[in-house]
Amino acid sequence: MRILVIGSGGREHALVWKLSQSPLVSEIIVAPGNGGMELEGVRNIPVKADDIAGLSRLAREEKVDLVVPGPELPLTEGIVDAMEILGIPCFGPDRYCAQMEGSKLFAKQIMEKSGVPTAACAAYNDPDSAKAFVRAKGAPLVIKADGLAAGKGVIVAQTVEEALEAIDSIMCQKAFGDAGRQVLIEEFLVGEEVSLLALCDGKHAVPLPSAQDHKAAYDGDTGPNTGGMGAYSPAPILPDSELEAMCDRVIRPILEQLDKEGHPFTGVLYAGLMMTAKGPKVLEYNVRFGDPECQPLLARLDSDLVEIILACLKGELSGDLVRFTPKSALGIVIAAAGYPGSYGKGMPIEGLKEAEEVADVKVFHSGTRLVNGQVQANGGRVLCVTALGNGLEEARSRAYEAAARISMPDSRYRSDIGIKGIERLAGKR
Ligand code: AMP
Ligand code: GLY
């Protein structure tokens, strides 16, 4: 099989790495790709991840048998629908189902119809009514732009002033463009966050082991929100023994509802959960693997990802196809200093080979390029150093040992990835 992977981050590097282990695969190409994928021996082709027409042309010209989109944008822009017209299988939800991520209001409505627990919320399309609601309710509140905003459209407002400012910024100054035509104002939830991802074939869902992301830029979950500074799996707050029950609560009802609406969901459905004192509540859905959650999850996947994808596309997914090692995995994101604000590019990266000499370590590239054989930084998140271990502590110490062997000027990483899980295992949480 010839496979086209869409995207250029660490998640897509992990997808390429895992897909290329399948005996069913003859060639993988990636658009637009990065330096790490090039080192993996796949061809990078400079077509952007949201250029649906360009990707369609590429898939046809290259005669690919399967398309695997990594990020949300091609999905919300309708890559699955476009490939269907060409008769090329594409692993993901159609444009209708991708609204589960593309519109927070759509996701809320589906949650309501299917009885999935989530934060109470109100939606507004004019700033004055939104502000009146905020003044009546009082803080804390969470203000969300309805549409895609590159992970920046959610403002947790601790005061009424912050909430009003957020409404101004989203609705009046249009900080996220059209994504802010509507806002959701949500009840503020307290608890620990965890991610449940499930493979879906339209009717059936198979949960993956749990994962925990670290969204804040700095240690102790402080600083601005990022795409994710590290992740590990499993997260002790959602153990394997509870995956099926959680899937029944937050994934399968959604699949049933979307199917009822004539759009069976195929691909990865990701529930971002808040484990509150009153039980789990869904914060958001994504319609793809998370980045960086994908890296530790795929490091743990023992079975053939191509077989799993083909089963999903045929509506024949079953749990026995999806096998994971009981080992833990942990990934540390090495970022350019300044990220998620402005940051430099082109810094040379050394020590990658030495890092992978640590047992069970794989360094996925999130934002790199190859220049005359030299790996250089080319993004905010640059690498995701991922390790397996017998238990979370071993995975963690291997990943940190490997990260310490990598040198890159003007870089930084969090030093507390996985600590919450280790504390919970020790009974300290
Ligand atoms: P989202 O993109 O909806 O997952 O929101 C991004 C982040 O904002 C989440 O990972 C949470 O940390 C936080 N967040 C979102 N919604 C809420 C809420 N209702 N209560 C508390 N925190 C929230
Ligand atoms: N790491 C969070 C996400 O991929 O949305």
Image: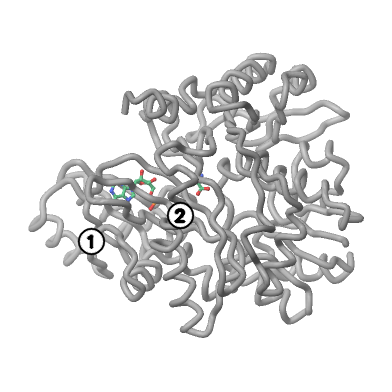
Image quarter of residue 374: top right
Left or right: 134 as drawn, with respect to 49: left
* Place of residue 12 in the rendered image (x, y in percent of width and height, measured from the top left): 69, 47
Residue 127 in the image, given as x and y percentages of width and height: 23, 63
- Label 1 element class: loop
Look at the picture and state if 232 lies above or below 273.
above
Is 164 situated left or right of 313 in this image?
Answer: left
In the picture, measured across the screen, residue 95 lies left or right of residue 179, that is right
**Residue 120, numbered circle:** 1
Residue sitting nearer the eye, 370 or 296: 296
Dot in front, 1 or 2: 1
Image point 82% across, 65% down: which residue? 58
Which residue is at a point 29% across and 62% down the rendered structure image?
A: 184
Identify the residue position indicated by label 2 in the image.
Answer: 149
The residue nearer to you, when weighing 214 against 79, is 214
* Amino acid type at image mark 2: Ala
Look at label 1 and name its amino acid. Ala
| Residue at the limit of the structure toward the left, as seen here | 136
**What residue lies at 72% left-to-right and 30% top-to-bottom?**
362
Q: Is residue 253 visible?
A: yes
- Between 337 and 261, the one lying in front of the other is 261
